[in-house]
Amino acid sequence: MVTLSRVSARLLIIPLAALLVVACEHNDLGTGTSGGGGGGTVPPLGAASTYGILAGTAVTCVTGGTIFADVGVSPGAAITGFPPCTLTGTRHAADAAAAAAQVALTSAYNALAAETCPPANNFGTTDQGGTTKTPGVYCSGSSIGVTGAITLNGQGDANARFVFQAGSSLITAGSVVLTNGTQAKNVWWLVGSSATLGTASAWQGNIVALTSITLNDNATMLGRALARNGGITLGTNNSIALP
């Protein structure tokens, strides 16, 4: 009969604990895969999570705008129009915090771009106004347009995830309606170039754009406007609140 000394037993326990840690880490990573469900902040925004606006070159606001969050820009440093526009958070212009937020934004952008869009969910250039979507990944190789309302039905799941991938642009003249448990924090709009929210658009979800984001007059967001390489421009009477 083979017996183990106390030292030998400890040597066996340590590798086993390490294996359990690795297994748990692998399982956590799996929550970021495509399809319905997933965590409310997947992909994790990390240092970018407190920003209602994050730009690469400049942030401008005409008048009457309110950002209920941080506003930042990096590597650019120009933030103009505050005041008369206001923000409740902190302004970060080309500082270490904004640089860290841009690194986190790049990671989030790449994670969203890696999500798999089922062929049946590729709607080409068809305007998505008047449609209803259930949790999942949807895409267009070029532009996503929304005229009127697009409804996102969470089917009773508060963690239901919606990812929209636009190869080039997002252009809106309408609103996003969330039903049956859908939360704005779980909605992602990935834009390969630039996004434009048309006049009086009522948008929900996080816009993650490679280049720039524009909010025309009276457009509002429950979400974030995050641009990697370009600027973010606000018109008159815009508001952005974190989801």
Image (cartoon, rainbow, N blue to C red):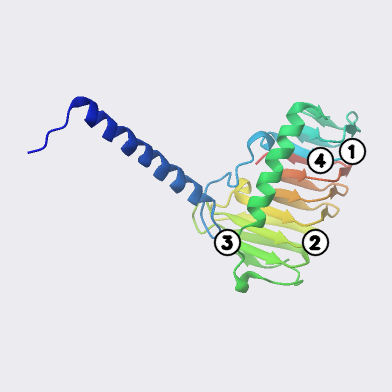
Name the spot of residue 226 as percent of width and height, x first: 75, 44
Mark 3 element type: strand
For the residues labelled 1 and 2, say whether their Cβ atoms are less than 8 Å apart. no
Task: Please tell me whether mark 1 or mark 3 is closer to you in this view.
Answer: 3
Name the spot of residue 3 as percent of width and height, x first: 12, 33
Distance, label 1 to label 3, CA atoms, is 34 Å
**Residue under circle 3?**
136
Mark 1 element type: strand
**Residue under circle 2?**
168
Q: Quadrant of residue 93?
A: top right
**Residue under circle 4?**
55
Q: Residue furthest left?
A: 1
**Residue under circle 1?**
61
In the depicted view, which residue is nearer to us: 74 or 159?
A: 74
Task: Answer with mark 4 or mark 1, whichever residue precedes in sequence.
Answer: 4
Distance, label 4 to label 3, CA atoms, is 27 Å
Task: Identify the residue at horizontal 57%, vertical 54% (top origin).
Answer: 161
Task: Please tell me whether mark 2 or mark 3 is closer to you in this view.
Answer: 2
Distance, label 4 to label 2, CA atoms, is 18 Å
